[in-house]
Image (cartoon, rainbow, N blue to C red):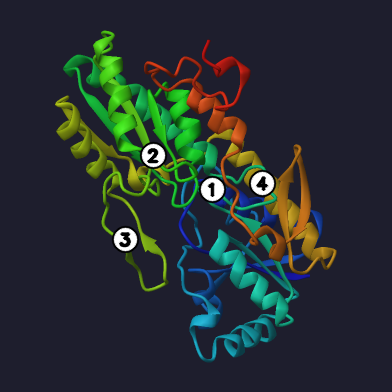
Amino acid sequence: MRIGILTGGGDCPGLNAVIRGATRAAEVTYDSTVIGFRNAWRGVMDNDYEILDVDRCRGILPLGGTILGTSRDQPFAHEDGLKRVRKAYDRHGLDAIIGIGGEGSMGVLNRLHENGFPVVGVPKTIDNDIALTEMTFGFQTAVQICTDAIDRLHTTAESHHRVLVVEVMGRHVGHIATWSGLAGGAAITLVPEDPFDIDEVCERIVHRHKKGRFATIVVVAEGALPRPGTFVIPAPEVDKYGHQILGGIGSLLAREIQGRTGIESRMTALGHIQRGGSPVAFDRVLGTRFGVAAVEAALDGAWGQMVALQRGRIERVAIGDAISSLKTVEPDLLRLNDMFQPRIPGDEHPGLPVDSPARVEH
């Protein structure tokens, strides 16, 4: 079998583990050939490729990024895109293409599947927001990087009696913010799933400082939004691919907190640091499992399917079903996050539903 493979969208720790796993499974176990297309679908359309083998993939497991390069270009952005993709299949004698990417890349694969192309998907997203898979590789690395940064920021916040706002990735969901906030002992964590009230945030900070805790870490996902009417943030710009250009909520929040509370507040945006560097062990193993499973799905002719982690096992799900909705933070995790927010008078049981018997005033 001849299988093409590409990495699309943003880079992510663990991509090389997928490439390595797929290549080794194809060459050693299934006597197949892997053609790696550079810079995602641009390489498919421009015939920019290399033949991948075990020797080429030697030593790439601990490397961040992707040896194939990546881009957000895709066939449906070009009038002759489908024709060029079909030409690539014919030119290389491809039996399938394995596409590794996030929601946008999975959407492209799904449309190609609907147009009769044999494709298999591997979910990749730092934000961990693709449905029907419990985890995506790269997420745990990003959480560890954020947690390490929060650990370091605690000491400077305590030394200067400051509020430190830490902005992390999370366009539409708050998985990274929630996990790193809990792991790093943040006082307040703000996520897109739960629009925040700036008055309440400031009240919790002031109450915390009045009790003698003179340092506060606030973790905020880049896509977090205030409740309507609390304070206004500028509408985000949009890039040429139609994606909102997020980032900046941390600066706005720090300025607003300092202005309302009088407590010195600073901001740190971790940005692309979260994407870079060597993947943690979990992401190396998950990426390897996904790569092997994707080759086996192609060998089985499971077109239009995406490999996914479910209850510790690698399963196959329809790509169309996986992109039908975003995977948001589980309510139980949001509740756990609330339990560790600073308490204010009248809120003696944070994290419990408002109508819970434990919160009924006596």
Q: Are marks 1 and 4 in contact (CB under 8 Å)?
A: no
In the foreground, 232 or 251: 232
Near mark 4 (Cα within 10 A), the count class, few <14, some 14-19 or many ≥20, is: many
Residue labelled with disc 2: 196
N-term mark: 4 or 3: 3
Which type of secondary structure does the marked residue at label 1 adopt? loop
Residue lying furthest front: 362
Q: Amino acid at mark 3?
A: Pro
Q: In this orientation, does residue 27 appear?
A: no
Near mark 2 (Cα within 10 A), the count class, few <14, some 14-19 or many ≥20, is: some
Q: Residue at x 62, y 57 (%)?
A: 325
Which type of secondary structure does the marked residue at label 2 adopt? loop
Q: Amino acid at mark 2?
A: Phe
Q: Real-space Cα distance between discs 3 and 1? A: 36 Å
Residue labelled with disc 4: 288
Q: Is residue 206 above or below residue 256?
A: above
Horizontal arrangement in the rendering, residue 24 relative to residue 56 (left or right): right
- Percent of width and height locating residue 160: 17, 18
- Percent of width and height locating residue 303: 77, 69
The mark closer to the camera, 3 or 1, is: 3
N-term mark: 3 or 1: 1
N-term mark: 2 or 3: 2
Q: Residue at x 38, y 19 (%)?
A: 342
Q: Real-space Cα distance between discs 1 and 4? A: 12 Å
Q: Amino acid at mark 1?
A: Ile
Residue labelled with disc 1: 60
